[in-house]
Image (cartoon, grey):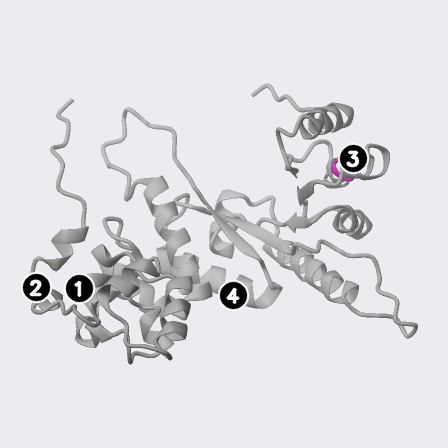
Amino acid sequence: MPRARFSVDEVVKLTIEFYRRNYIEGLFLSSGVIRSPDATMSDMVQIARKLRHEEGFRGYIHLKTIPDAAPELIEEAGLLSDRLSINVELPTDAALSTYAPEKNPGQIRRAMADVRQRQEVSKDRSHTGKRPPKFAPAGQSTQVIIGADASTDATVLGQSTRLYSSYGLRRVYYSAFSPIPDSSAKLPLISPPLQREHRLYQADWLLRFYGFSVDEITSVTPDGNLNLDIDPKLAWALAHRGLFPLDVNRASRELLLRVPGFGVKTVSRILTTRRYRHLRYEDIVRMGASMKKAGAFVTAGGWTPGTLTDSVNLRARFAPPPEQMSLF
């Protein structure tokens, strides 16, 4: 297929003109490999260098680096940018070898480890107390393509957990793969790609900020995939109704974080306020809780869900109504 790309000077000009007009606050720069990894990475570094040193650009720069590029190029990229990305591409090494055999998973992990090491070194002071230049101060992230192979959501989230732990990532991005429709194909897609992507982001948030484990989130369905009709926190709560309803005036922070409709800020407000007075239903509403979801799972002053928690129709209150499928 014919390819097109911007030159170094074109990217610099476009970025700085948009920035000066206040249309953008930063630049996310990515590229396919052109000529060679080093040649492509050199162009990307040159763009960042010109923006920073020649144009005085003080906006945010996120560079998507190429693992096979020379270490000195990645080092300069980290000194010029706020965040670096190195994509693991697919959930497993086996999938990568099948669909992108030209990519080396070991090299990708080594490059991610090198970025983390450089970040750690940049935080250390010298014996004189002087700090070295900042290296990718906003951290590094990665991207995982979902739906291109048969990996379940449990596999995807397990990989993400290991990446967060091993490389200190700030974010894992999930990118839905949508195959080109084939008129001869008779089998439907396993799941709507964008809906699956959305549920994975929700589950990722639960892993990072709500104390859930991968097994807890993915064990509520028999196949290790997230429920597409309802969010993963609600799916977990419906599968563990024996823990509910919780008394908002007594329950621990860990359990309150598992209540559908309660966010981290809401739980913090509950814990702070209940030290001084007994919380009522209207207090929880004012704190930002979504009582449409949470109401079936908590008790408070002036509120009890009664038999709603154990109602056989509880899930139907949250799941989208059935739709008539088109015949044509």
Total labels drawn: 4
Front residue of 3 and 195: 195
Q: Position of residue 95 (x, y in %)?
A: 47, 50
**Which quarter of the rendering shows the N terminus?**
top right
Which residue has dot 4 on it? Answer: 162
Asked if one can make out residue 45 in the rendered structure from this viewpoint, the answer is yes
Q: What element carries label 3?
A: helix
* Quarter of the picture holding the C terminus: top left
Check disc 4 and give the amino acid type: Arg
Q: Give the range drawn in magenta.
A: 43-47
Of the two numbered discs 4 and 1 on the same chain, state the one appearing first in sequence. 4
Q: Name the residue under label 3.
A: 51
Distance from disc 4 to disc 1, alpha carbons, whole Å, reads 34 Å
- Disc 2 to disc 1, C-alpha distance: 9 Å
Q: Earlier in the sequence, mark 3 or mark 4?
A: 3
**Numbered badge on residue 296:** 1
